[in-house]
Image: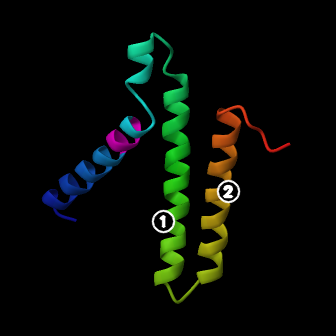
Amino acid sequence: MSGATKILTSVKYVYLVAFFALLSGVFYPFIQGGTLDFTIYGVIILFVGLAGAIMVYKAATSDKKRGFYIGIGFGLLAISVYYILQLTGRPLA
């Protein structure tokens, strides 16, 4: 892997972290005077959902281990939805 490729990969991951931080409302605690706890939880939940979506995509584009990717992908998506419901105060049980 060349130096330029490593830099491009790093920029890509920094962009994803920044995007998810903004998407989960990183500015809300600063405006309302709250804590960053829910923002950190939101970023983690979004990354779990992203990992699940990537696994489902890999299942669609892969010939081998398709069932494995689908199972892991939908499992991660279900975990993400469960955590979202828990975080918003609407538990399943």
In front: label 1 or label 2: 2
- Identify residue type, mark 2: Ala
Q: Is residue 7 left or right of residue 22?
A: left
Which residue position is annotated with label 1? 54
Furthest residue in direction bottom, as rendered: 63
Q: Which residues are magenta?
A: 17-21
Percent coordinates x, y for residue 40 in the rendering: 50, 31
Q: Secondary structure at mark 2?
A: helix
Point 34% across, 48% down: residue? 16
**Residue depicted at x 61% and y 58%:** 77
What main secondary structure does the magenta stretch of the protein show? helix
82 w.r.t. 78: above or below: above
Q: Residues within 10 Å of mark 2 (few under 14, many from 20)?
A: some
Labelled disc at residue 84:
none
The first of marks 1 and 2 along the sequence is 1
According to the image, label 2 marks what residue? Answer: 78
Q: Is residue 19 highlighted in magenta? A: yes
**Which residue shows up at 53% across the image and 68% down it?**
55
Image x and y of residue 10, in percent: 26, 50
SS class, disc 1: helix
